[in-house]
Amino acid sequence: MSIMETMEKKQRVRYVYLVIPILFSLIIYAQGLSGGFVWDDRSLILQNPIVQNPEKLLQSFKTSLTIFGEDYGYYRPLSIISFAIDHLIWQKNAFGFHLTNLLLHILAVLCLIYFLHQLFDFTKAIIASILFSAFAVHIENVIFISGRMDILATLFMLLSLICYLTAKHQSVFRLILSYVLILVALLSKEIALVFPLVFALVVIQKFSRETWKNHFKQGGLLIGAGFVTYFLLKLILLNNVINTPGTNIPFWSRFLNIPRLIIFYLQVIVFPYNLNARHYNFLSDRMQVGMVIFCSILLLMIILAIVRIRKKWQITFGWLWFLIGLLPVLNIFPLYGITVAERFLYFPSIGIAILLAGLLPEGLFSFKSIGGRNLLLALILFMIFANNMVFAFMRVPVWHDEEIFFRTMVIQNPESPLAHHNLGHFYYRQGNWASAEEEYKKAIKINPYFPAPHASLGDIYFRTGQYHEAVREYSRYLQLFPDAPNRTATIARIKELQELLHNANNE
């Protein structure tokens, strides 16, 4: 057999390997294609005039992310446009939106293989991609339609890195394309703000020390141009460059809680037994000081272990990627809305996949003598993979429809007023007002100062003709939430009801 034929045979074998991570993705997520619109999907897609009306598409560049009337201040026009394109094709058929999420995820997996092949050997690239495909923590990105934003940002960052790494003789077209992809990633989600650090990490891995300076200069121009364009768009179209949400959590509490967050995110990737749509209790108070200390010690031990095996640079590379990816979601700068979420891990989890693949011995798949220690390590990694597959397969049905989703949220978070309110709101939309009223009252019992269920109770009493009770609940809502976005409409509703009550008393 000639050298050329041997190379072609190896290439065909590699194409077969590409099927493996795709197959695992399909096994996990295909069951989610029959699901519906859940949670934020209702606001971001079904009730979003930009998504519903193609002629308003450009308005996405002039508005920040708003969910159920609450402006979060985030700038993600490309993600909103992706929803609008889906709606143009599929209308209100959730299958098409789920299919797009799955295809984007598979494309991200393929890009990850190609990208990692540029940095490490092909076998390690395939293993890392298989692990990445199996991580159950990605369910919130792939099955939850609104979780697409992290997939888009990750995909475009990987494509930008690929364009740069494969640009021959400093190809101007490839470099310009890399700049465009950086910008598109930023316009998809703010996780792309870590791109400069990721680029620096990739340059250190890929290129010789003598060429670092040139790559940093060239990459700095591309990244700088992308960032300047992004911030100019925000300044001109939103009159806002940096969103700084307020928080009642002191900086030092957020800072001291970082080790606990890192360990939690690491655990939920490696052993995802506690997947949850809402994760609570991440504030540092007296009851949690012991946990913060324990996690700090554990994190220090992990870092020391990685330093000891620093000769395997792939492990250090993966760990640094993970930490860099977490920077925007560690609450160093406070997040608005949900402060801890599994969907935040789509990009950082690439680092853990790289790290775990780097732990495998070189001769494992060539049947060389690798010793009992390495076999044990391979078995542990297989158990991590198998656990993720099992938990993922069990978790996907939870996101199938809103009733299952909100019931599960209440079971997992029985003391959460928001969980009960969300379930009540589902019942309200179904016309099951008795069950809705029961859930709203549970939410108020847990937290009497939570305003939303008071307004929702007011809606039920208005519909059922209990006008005195409706006025009481609407008034309490405005008392608790004086700056409510629907304040004017609520006041008008109260006046309408008071007039009806006055007329009824005079008859």
Image (spheres, rainbow, N blue to C red):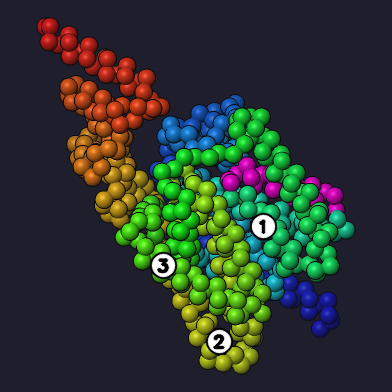
* Image location (x, y in percent) of residue 455: 29, 30
Label 1 amino acid?
Leu
Q: Which residues are magenta?
A: 171-190
Label 2 or label 3, whichever comes before in sequence order: 3
Seen in the picture, residue 425 relative to 100 is either above or below; the reply is: above
* Image location (x, y in percent) of residue 327: 56, 55
Calculate the distance from the C-alpha at mark 1 to the C-alpha at mark 3. 28 Å
Relative side of 227 to 492, left or right:
right
Q: Is disc 1 in contact with disc 2, using a CB cutoff of under 8 Å?
A: no
* Image location (x, y in percent) of residue 56: 58, 27
Label 3 amino acid?
Ile
Q: Is disc 2 in contact with disc 3, using a CB cutoff of under 8 Å?
A: no
Label 2 amino acid?
Asn
Calculate the distance from the C-alpha at mark 1 to the C-alpha at mark 2. 32 Å
Where does the N terminus fall, quadrant-wise?
A: bottom right
Q: Main secondary structure of the magenta part?
A: helix
